[in-house]
Amino acid sequence: MHKPVMVVEDDMDIRSNFIAALKLEDYPVYSAVNGVEALRLLESLETSALPGCIIIDLMMPEMNGKEFIKKIKEHVNKDISSINLVVATAKGNSETQEPLPYEVERLQKPLGLDDLYDVVERLNRD
Amino acid sequence: MSLSHLISEEVFEKSPAFIAVLLGDNFVFNKVNPRYLEITGNRDIIGKPVMEALPELEGQGFLELLQKVYTTGETFEGKEIPAQLLAAGSTEPRKLFLNFIYQRLTDEYSNPIGIYVFGVDVTDQVKARILIEESENQFRQFMDTMPQMAFIANQTGDITYFNKPWYEYTKGIEGTEGWGWKDQPIHHPDDLDLAIKRWTHSVKTGEPYEIEYRLRRYDGVYRWHLGRATAMRDKDGHITRWIGTNTDIHDNKEIEARLSESVKSRDEFLSIASHELKTPLTTLRLQNQIFKRAALKGHTNIFEKQNVIDMVDQNERQVIRLTRLVDDMLDVSRIRFNKLTTKIENVDLSALVNDFMNRMKPQFEQKKYQAPILDIEENISCSIDRLRIEQVLSNLVTNAIRYGNQKQISVSLKRTDTEIKLSVTDHGIGINPENITRIFDKFERAIDANEVSGLGLGLYISKKIMEEHHGDLTVQSWPDEGSIFTVHLPTGATNA
């Protein structure tokens, strides 16, 4: 049984597609529309139920992706701060990536299923 | 009084000065030294009255001068007095410049007896100086014809000359006294310190002076100039003076600034546009691949009727989104070339608004809004471009949903004596006063691009559309309280 994957994405359609794609490979999925909601959800979970990785959209209202990454990486709960993070961004291309507060895996939109599965398979481990 | 009272025989003979003694009131040459003979052309002049000996002096004023000194006893001291004298063996007089004195000689009873002449030929010095003056004049004339402002400064850095363009630029301060480098600078206060620092440094070291600064024109406008000055040196390398120019680079500077501004805004636009285009593409791509993968894996439940309808609807939304993005980009390009066309027809605006708001219902529900309050006056007809006005309304309502914080949104359509007003009111985040003027600009949004998606073109295009209708689009807003966007259409355009 896979560990759950969390998707933080404000675009409803992309979010539902991520969920559908991950479910197709039998990943349990948590989803949130922004960083604030995602953080609240993470903090409410038992350690055993925490996701193995979080896919984050960079451009979101309330708390943008960068702020969310900082919040996770600097979280007091080590089980949360150690979760693998993946950024999915439509900004720029592989040559013009904007700097992030922490080094994290990147997915360049528009991404394909293989890109998604590849990253999740590598990062969503115990 | 004999000559030996005045000068020794040896000095008289060997002096580089010319010396003569004229006696009587007709000024007979009594004694002259070799230098005097030399400059008068070695003629036989002893014993002859001056006008007979040197007839070419006629009309040059010397006789009158001699007479005056003879009569009044006042010594005459002349500097660089021009004299036309015949040289030896020549019939053409040559022009000399002489420094000399005429001093009256008297007898023991103080009666006038003659004139003592003592002088030096300064022709070479004067001619050299005139040459310099001429070249200086030519140089200044040249400076005056330059389009740039130019100046000359002495070796200590004080300005000694400004050219014509300088006075044309500054006006009202004719004459160098009006402009002191230090006391009455025309430099922008923010640039003055640097200008003085650079100038002082150059004057001290002899290094070329170069600076960009703003100089005040006669009308008080500061314009950017490139100031340059170079030290002129004598043959020993000593600085004799500085020659400098100020070239107006204001227009270039402004073009440069506008260019870099437009490059920046284009880059930002491209970055936002590519982001906005990639978002629907992401959905479409994932959607496609999910279908294929589900089919390959035999997950037939994904092809159930409702699921297929939902997914096709989803794809439709992406296509609409892409189309709208492309339309917006095209509109911006049309506006840029003044080609935003409108197709004016008589339209029932009340029906248009009601109909549009009806179609927007799902968007309100989807974004968790209550149904908007509509206050639409019936039967308002006017001459407008139906699609364009709907585009404006769509922009305003979409913005209200986007920035409305899920609080009540209302739309009203009213007609007054002078205009038709269509307002969209939200109670969301509002706009800070400092941002309110630029929200109608291209590619602007009042909040961080990291937080809200969209091209930032909606209000810009809407404003232009309203201008095409001879109307306007205005906003009132209060941070954290919300905004009211109002479309104004002139009643003159109506056919009700």
Image (cartoon, coloured by chain):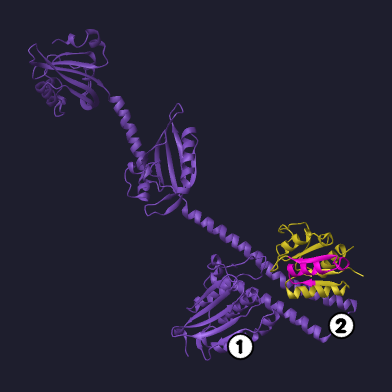
Chain colours: A yellow, B purple
Q: Name the residue: 55% across, 76% down.
A: B484
| Figure quadrant of residue B424 | bottom right
Question: x%, y% of residue B210?
Answer: 49, 42
| Figure quadrant of residue B265 | bottom right
In the rendered image, is residue B92 in sight?
A: no
Give left or right: position of B492 versus B46.
right
Give left or right: position of B268 versus A90.
left
Q: Chain of mark 2?
A: B
Which segment is the magenta one? A31-57
Q: Is residue B132 above or below residue B248?
A: above
Q: Chain of mark 1?
A: B
* Residue that label 2 marks: B301
* Residue that label 1 marks: B355
Total number of numbered labels? 2
Q: Is residue A71 above or below residue B119?
A: below
Question: Which of the two discs, 1 and 2, labels the residue nearer the N terminus?
Answer: 2
Question: x%, y% of residue B222?
Answer: 43, 53
Q: Amino acid at mark 1?
A: Asp
Is disc 1 surrounded by few (<14), some (14 to 19) or many (20+) residues within 10 Å?
Answer: few
